[in-house]
Image: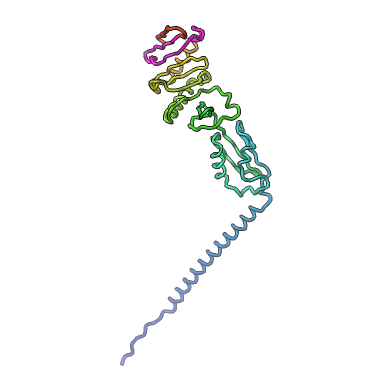
């Protein structure tokens, strides 16, 4: 009678698999050990950074102050000299200060050796607008803010409007006009829409200038002609001008209405 064959266990294969498993476990343990060491080192480094006196703030320097004062900016900073330089989020602080100070166009806060440096970039009003009984500033970002310091003495026009859309469109007009009539802007005291949605300028010697429809005519050409007619008319009529009408400039014609008379002077071929 034949004996049945028993399966042969390959001991060498079992040993190899066990060895691979041990190596795998060792590698996982080594990775965990390294990770734990990194975490421990990071915690110790953080403790060192936040407690080392060499990282304490000695001075807070504020630059770029024109109308905003250094003291009012420092009052908004939640830390003082002696605090650790890494304890606060500078990006968050920049955002908070800018929200409280709309007259700042930009603020940049950076760390220096034992010092916090605050750089201010203030907004400059391009026009005035009315807010109740007072005037406030408005820049070309369409951001309004209270007037400060020398802003009250600036010779810039007052923008009059009924809606936010009119405000935006008039501000765009001022932006385009200023590029070609920068030397004339201090003569303009008011800019508004007329009865027929045409733009009307008023000057410091009470002369109205009917510009016409916005963007209908080349701004540079019209601004040049406006300045020429204005200053030439002042010389010829000794400030005796009620208004200047530029609505017919496309036909090379400008109308000047003289004050205290019904006389109109047409200037052709300009």
Furthest residue in direction front, as rendered: 133
From the top left corner, tell me how far across and down residue 7 is, in percent.
37, 82
In the displayed structure, 221 sits above or below 261; it is below
In the displayed structure, 258 sits above or below 143; it is above
Specify the color scheme: rainbow
From the top left corner, tell me how far across and down residue 103 is, in percent.
55, 34
Magenta residue check for 253: yes
Q: Residue at x 56, y 62 (%)?
A: 36
In the displayed structure, 180 sits above or below 145; it is above
- Magenta segment, which residues? 233-257
Q: Residue at x 47, y 9 (%)?
A: 259
Point out the image quarter for the N terminus: bottom left
Q: Which quarter of the picture shows residue 152? A: top right
Point out the image quarter for the C terminus: top left
Given residues 218 and 100, the one toward you in this image is: 100
Furthest residue in direction left, as rendered: 1
Q: Which quarter of the picture shows residue 105? A: top right
Given residues 14 and 264, the one toward you in this image is: 264
In the displayed structure, 220 sits above or below 53; it is above
User: Taking 97 as reference, is 262 left or right?
Assistant: left
Given residues 107 and 131, the one toward you in this image is: 131
Q: Residue at x 43, y 31 (%)?
A: 164
Furthest residue in direction bottom, as rendered: 1
Magenta residue check for 165: no
From the top left corner, tell me how far across and down residue 221 is, in percent.
43, 18
Q: Residue at x 45, y 28 (%)?
A: 167
Given residues 190 and 40, the one toward you in this image is: 190
From the top left corner, tell me how far across and down residue 141 is, in percent.
48, 32
């Amino acid at each position: 009678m034949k004996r049945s064959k028993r399966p042969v266990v390959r001991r060498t294969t079992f040993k190899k698999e066990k060895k691979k498993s041990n190596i795998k476990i060792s590698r996982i343990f080594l990775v965990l050990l390294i990770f734990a060491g990194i975490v421990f080192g990071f915690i110790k480094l953080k403790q060192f950074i936040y407690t080392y006196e060499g990282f304490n703030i000695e001075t807070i320097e504020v630059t770029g102050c024109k109308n905003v004062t250094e003291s009012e900016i420092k009052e908004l900073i939640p830390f003082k000299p002696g605090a650790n330089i890494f304890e606060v989020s500078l990006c968050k602080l920049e955002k908070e200060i800018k929200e409280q100070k709309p007259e700042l166009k930009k603020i940049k806060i950076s760390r220096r050796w034992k010092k916090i440096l605050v750089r201010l970039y203030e907004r400059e009003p391009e026009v005035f607008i009315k807010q109740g009984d007072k005037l406030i500033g408005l820049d070309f970002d369409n951001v309004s803010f209270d007037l400060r310091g020398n802003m009250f003495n600036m010779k810039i026009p007052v923008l009059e409007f009924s809606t936010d859309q009119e405000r935006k469109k008039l501000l765009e007009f001022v932006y385009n006009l200023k590029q070609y009539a920068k030397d004339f802007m201090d003569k303009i005291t008011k800019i508004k829409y007329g009865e027929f949605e045409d733009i009307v300028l008023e000057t410091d010697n009470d002369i109205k200038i009917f510009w016409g429809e916005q963007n209908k005519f080349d701004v540079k050409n019209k601004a040049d002609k406006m300045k020429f007619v204005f200053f030439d008319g002042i010389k010829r009529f000794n400030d005796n001008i009620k208004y200047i009408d530029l609505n017919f400039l496309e036909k090379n014609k400008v109308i000047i209405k003289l004050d205290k008379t019904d006389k109109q002077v047409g200037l052709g071929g300009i």
